[in-house]
Image: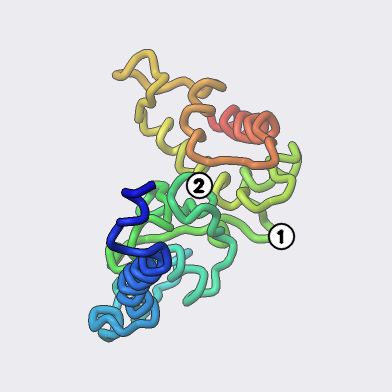
Amino acid sequence: MDGIRNFPITRRELLKAGVTSATAIAVPSLSLAQGTDPAATSPPVVEKVSFQVNGKQQSLQLDTRTTLLDALREHLHLTGTKKGCDHGQCGACTVIVDGRRINSCLTLAVMHEGARVTTIEGLGTPDKLHPLQAAFVKHDGYQCGYCTPGQICSAVAMLEEIKDGVPSHVSLDLTARPPLNADEIRERMSGNICRCGAYSNILDAITEVAGSRA
């Protein structure tokens, strides 16, 4: 007890010192959050990017930090492509660029100068559905429908991969054309998440179209 009584700082003084230290730490963070950091107030870098979207030439003036997903949704108003996780983990933003499927949330629009971009709007129309769109309707592979554009774009590109002989992690023979079977389809579609759990219906839809192309 004598040691406590003779301690050179009181409890009140210790609390004051703690509050002062916490304030000193918080003030710079608050300043950054309010945009007083010079780096945060610098104007964005804007560049022109031109690419073909669903067969139509498009030219946009974009902040170089704009993702392809935001360019499609916010600037071209092609809202069929969905923003799901925004981390490249769910596949809802899948589009086809130069014949390959990509997560449009993970790539910058300015990286695709001169590219050919296909979104769900470019695959079919209500009057003339793409075979995969029709199959998804037939087999109830969409349910809530949020992930469906990404699922269908991914499936379109996936069938072309198989046609071109591109192997996957489950392909037994890397030199032969992969078979159009359930294991291959499941593996190749594993990057597209369906939170409704309609995987069996999605598989049925893709299998039907794959069978018609075999």
Q: Does residue 66 appear anywhere in the picture?
A: no
Side of 198 relative to 94 (left or right) = right
Residue 132, position as x, y percentages in the image? 62, 43
Q: Is 33 placed left or right of 122 in the picture? A: left
Secondary structure at numbered mark 1? loop
Where is residue 79 shown, x and y percent of the image?
58, 66
The local crowd at label 2, few if under 14, some if 14 to 19, many if 20 or more residues have their Cα within 10 Å, is many
Q: Closer to the camera, 76 or 177?
A: 76
Residue 27 % position (x, y):
34, 77
Q: Return the residue found at the far front.
A: 2
**Structure colour scheme:** rainbow
In this view, 91 is above or below 190:
below
Q: Which mark is residue 127?
A: 1
Q: Residues within 10 Å of mark 1 (few under 14, many from 20)?
A: few
**Does residue 185 appear anywhere in the picture?**
yes
Sequence-first disc among 2 and 1: 2
Please, what is the three-letter code of the amino acid marked with disc 2?
Answer: Gly
Three-letter code for the amino acid on which mark 1 is drawn = Asp
For image coordinates 51% across by 24% down, the residue present is 180
Q: Which label sits in the foreground, 2 or 1?
A: 2
Question: What residue lies at 53% left-to-right and 41% top-to-bottom?
Answer: 192
Q: Residue at x 35, y 53 (%)?
A: 98
- Whether 149 is drawn above or below 12: the answer is above
Identify the mark at residue 91; answer none if there is no mark.
2
Q: CA distance from mark 2 to mark 1?
A: 26 Å
